[in-house]
């Protein structure tokens, strides 16, 4: 396909396209057939990571002309290994035209590994090493409220990993693809969201194979509501106690005391139902999280009160 120039900015040589990638995408080479990206890699090859390649055509990497090329994630780019660092800190690698098509056209040039000013969230290319074996392309979908890095459809994106890639590295990639900040939880499958995968687990150990959709979610505290029954009226609810799955028994006690007017020092949180005899080992440790004590959404949590219930609850009940 013919090469077409993207708009250039009057900036430093390695930031010739200062506009976001979306602006540069107005001039894009046609995407090659999927078969072009297959086959064993060789020394100095790179993989495409974001689906776009920025190319400075010609033998002079200081040219201000930059092309934006569509290439599938996992597509192989052949280079000489010669890296040019621009004055603004961007890294560009020289294409190897000795075998014809470089994966970024047959004409000479330099392609961007990573540089600022292009609207990309991270490196566009990843060095390929034959000893790492074939890469895997996994899939992930942007969570509710999130956007893809380029703001475009589809909301599901492919990303490249190796069998030795860790869950911690997968989290970094997912954050980059969907503009997510903070910690993430990655799961082995959609039906197993109770136990996030440990950071040091590898892609191979997790059982991920080509085209696996990786299930993940922001690792924030989730809302958890426990029920407290009225100790003065059997069968009547006193209140719903809004907590999170990070809340401790002690925090539940504090919230209950502040909400109802009960005295925190006279309260002992217990496992059991209000009005029923509790076992000797029913006392809950204030330092433990309520979920670690076995509580789930909508469960009843009880307490023993050593003060004057009628007097201390009068204002709340009224």
Image (tube, rainbow, N blue to C red):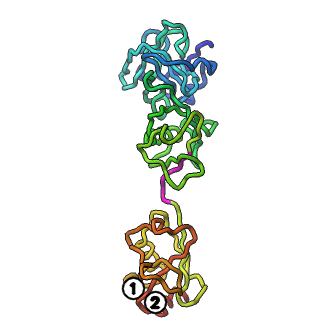
> What residue sits right under mark 2 in the picture?
312
Name the spot of residue 113 as percent of width and height, x first.
Answer: 44, 24
Could one spot residue 31 in this view of the protein?
no
Q: What is the crowding at mark 2: few (fewer than 14 residues within 10 Å), some, or many (at least 20)?
A: some
> Mark 1 vs mark 2: which is more N-terminal?
1
* Along the line of sight, the residue nearer the viewer: 125 or 297: 297
Name the spot of residue 138 as percent of width and height, x first.
Answer: 56, 35
- Residue at x 47% of width, y 13% of height: 95
Task: Work out which quarter of the rendered image holds the C terminus and state it.
Answer: bottom right
Kind of element beneath mark 1: helix
Q: Is residue 153 left or right of residue 74?
A: right
- Residue at x 50% of width, y 47% of height: 186
Q: Which residues are magenta?
A: 215-221
Name the spot of residue 296 as percent of width and height, x first.
Answer: 54, 67
- Residue at x 52% of width, y 70% of height: 242
Name the spot of residue 89 as percent of width and height, x first.
Answer: 36, 26
- Position of 13 relative to 209 (above/below): above
> What residue sits right under mark 1 in the picture?
266
Report how far apart the C-alphas of labels 1 and 2 lie in the structure: 11 Å
């Amino acid at each position: 396909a013919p090469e077409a120039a993207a708009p250039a900015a009057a900036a430093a040589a390695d930031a010739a396209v200062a506009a976001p990638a979306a602006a540069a995408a107005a001039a894009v080479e046609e995407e090659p057939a999927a078969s072009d990206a297959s086959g064993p890699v060789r020394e100095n090859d790179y993989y495409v990571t974001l689906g776009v390649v920025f190319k400075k055509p010609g033998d002079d990497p200081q040219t201000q002309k930059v092309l934006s090329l569509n290439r599938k994630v996992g597509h192989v780019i052949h280079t000489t290994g010669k890296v040019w660092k621009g004055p603004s800190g961007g890294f560009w690698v020289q294409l190897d035209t000795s075998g014809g098509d470089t994966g970024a056209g047959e004409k000479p040039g330099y392609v961007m590994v990573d540089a600022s000013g292009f609207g990309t969230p991270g490196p566009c290319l990843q060095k390929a090493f034959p000893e790492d074996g074939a890469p895997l392309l996994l899939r992930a979908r942007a969570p509710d409220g999130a956007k893809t890095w380029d703001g475009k459809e589809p909301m599901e994106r492919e990303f490249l990993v190796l069998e030795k890639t860790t869950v911690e590295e997968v989290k970094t990639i997912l954050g980059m693809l969907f503009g997510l900040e903070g910690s993430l939880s990655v799961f082995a499958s959609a039906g197993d969201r109770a136990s996030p995968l440990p950071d040091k687990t590898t892609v191979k150990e997790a059982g991920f194979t080509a085209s696996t959709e990786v299930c993940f979610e922001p690792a924030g505290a989730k809302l958890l509501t426990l029920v407290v029954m009225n100790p003065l009226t059997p069968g009547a609810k006193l209140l719903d106690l809004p907590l999170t799955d990070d809340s401790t028994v002690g925090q539940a006690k504090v919230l209950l005391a502040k909400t109802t007017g009960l005295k925190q020092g006279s309260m002992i949180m217990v496992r059991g139902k209000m009005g029923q005899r509790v076992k000797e080992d029913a006392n809950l440790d204030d330092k433990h999280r309520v979920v670690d004590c076995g509580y789930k959404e909508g469960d009843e949590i009880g307490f023993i009160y050593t003060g004057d219930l009628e007097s201390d609850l009068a204002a709340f009940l009224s």
